[in-house]
Image (cartoon, rainbow, N blue to C red):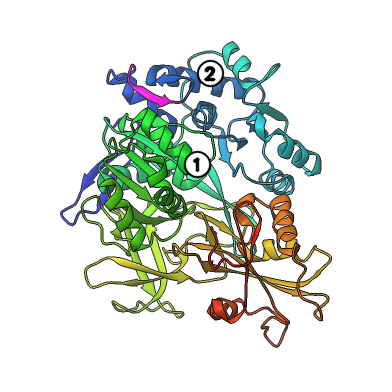
Amino acid sequence: MPDHCLTVTSEQGAARLQFSPRFNLAAALIDRHLQEGRGDALAIRTASEDISYALLAERIARAGNALLALGVPRDGRLLMVVRDEPAFFYLFLGAIRAGIVPIPVNTLLRAADYAWLIDDSAAHALAYSPEFAAEVSAGLREARHHPGVILPTAGEGEALPKLMEAAAPHLAPAERGPEDDCFWLYSSGSTGRPKGAIHHQRDLAVVARCYGVETLGVRPSDVFFSAAKLFFAYGLGNGLAFPLWVGGTSILMPERPTPEATFATIARFRPTIFFGVPTLFARQIAEFARLKPDLSSLRFCVSAGEMLPAHLFTAWRELTGTEIIDGIGSTEMTHMYISNRPGEVRPGTTGRPVPGYEVKIVDEDGRQLPVGMPGRLLVRGLSVAKAYWRNPRPIVVDGWFDTGDTYRANEDGTYTYAGRSDDMLKVGGIWCSPVEIESVLIEHPAVLEAAVVGRADADQLIKPEAWIVLKNQDAPAPPGLAAELVQLCKTRLAPYKYPRWFRFVSDLPKTATGKIQRFKLRDRAPEATPATVIESTGAPMPEARAPL
């Protein structure tokens, strides 16, 4: 059997996968395209260069050899703070080919976050794009652990390009099996601390076949453009695994995915599939008349990260003539496990289980619930991560992964999202902890207590809302306080985590032991307490009712 997985589709439509005992993910994604004569096909396109599969294979080998020459051991760990650029592919796949474990992490974090990740991962090496140098350098100074190799992806001196130029252009893939460690992805937990999910060599291959091929119908002629960045599980599948699995082309855009930037990229590179998140689709719809984008190359779009409201699906289809395929996945499961299908979208639902995955909805005692009853969503499939690093919490319990989401099954076999099973909230498709935001808000000298919950905006997308108790409760909130709190959050936290609403109250609902009851704040009518609404620039909007 060749060193990549084969797929057999059963009569019920569930994909069954068989792997060779020798399976190196980097070899599976690249080598067969060269063996089958597709070396000249375009693998990556950027604003500055086009990269063929043959050139990509060479650069992956050079990057892997460079890491080994620097002393990174096989089975060692490479922390990656790398933007969406070809160097991400070189390092991620070069490490895997060499038997090193890459760990791509969020490039929007602050120094304290990087310090924690450096210490927790005990990484042997750290690679970073130069634009993140300030936060990464500060994180390195704060960290207790010191990686032996620090590698910028560009610049003068001992940067990645110079080291790759000196490295050999060929590298035999490290002997690995489908269940061996391959890469990590960090995911936020209920306490706000991220957990390192250890993924197998097979996991990205499973989702590329089961979701990319079996569900979306991707093909070699497709051009893939993911606004979701490569450090996300969602973006890693969209922008790297899917195109490389079928021999398609990945479009890389390192800039922030604004409507202007994404529309311009689509017009220039003519992708056939665009992957976004509901917040971006809402902004694109709002700017559509002004920007007048040419989206005629698209076969369809894909959305994940948070539920896609039905009205956004309808508005997008009316404007573009294309569908948005909504689905749900997770870091632990690598990518999607429930999704709509092209031509079979039921707006407002997440669709049906992806081939190769099983789901069930259970009550608090683990009993399976009937159709129509909301409960906890459990899932199982071959792409589930092996374990959490340095964390005793098991990923799989009795064969199932608990997603933490509340869902209900519908009569037609689709599933509908009914909310998060805990206090975590997703903003722009990224999990964040209310405790983390609260801890920054109460640093302000005027704030006594703070509680953060998720609130739906005008497009029914979730954003943080802060409930604030002031130290001086006899006076109204100063006019500039909300803007100061926004700036504090943007300085101390990843920029998407700042609250969009501020509600100043005399007290917060609590349990008898003093724990804040956030569910009571979520359930409280928005009109019950006047709110200061914050623009995306951080400026207060006293008369506004909904955030941008």
Q: Is residue 58 visible?
A: yes
Q: Is residue 22 visible?
A: no
Q: Position of residue 180 (x, y in %)?
A: 48, 41
Closer to the camera in the image, 137 or 445: 445
Q: Is residue 430 above or below residue 100?
A: below
Disc 1: which residue: 257
At horizontal 76% and vertical 75% (from top left) the residue drawn is: 476
| Disc nearer the start of the sequence (1/2) | 2
Quarter occupied by residue 130:
top right
Is label 1 in a helix, a strand or a loop? Answer: loop
Disc 2: which residue: 62
Q: Position of residue 540 (x, y in %)?
A: 66, 61
Query: From the viewer's perspective, is 223 left or right of 255?
Result: left
The stretch of residues the image draws in magenta is: 40-46
**Residues at badges 1 and 2 in contact (C-beta under 8 Å)?**
no
Circle 1: is it few (<14), some (14-19), or many (20+) Cα within 10 Å?
some
331 inside magenta stretch: no
**Disc 1 vs disc 2: which is toward the camera?**
1
Query: From the viewer's perspective, is 530 left or right of 24?
Result: right
At horizontal 54% and vertical 27% (from top left) the residue drawn is: 87
Closer to the camera in the image, 459 or 120: 459
Quarter occupied by residue 467:
bottom right
42 inside magenta stretch: yes
C-alpha gap between disc 1 and disc 2: 30 Å
**Amino acid under label 2?**
Arg
Q: Position of residue 167 (x, y in %)?
A: 57, 14
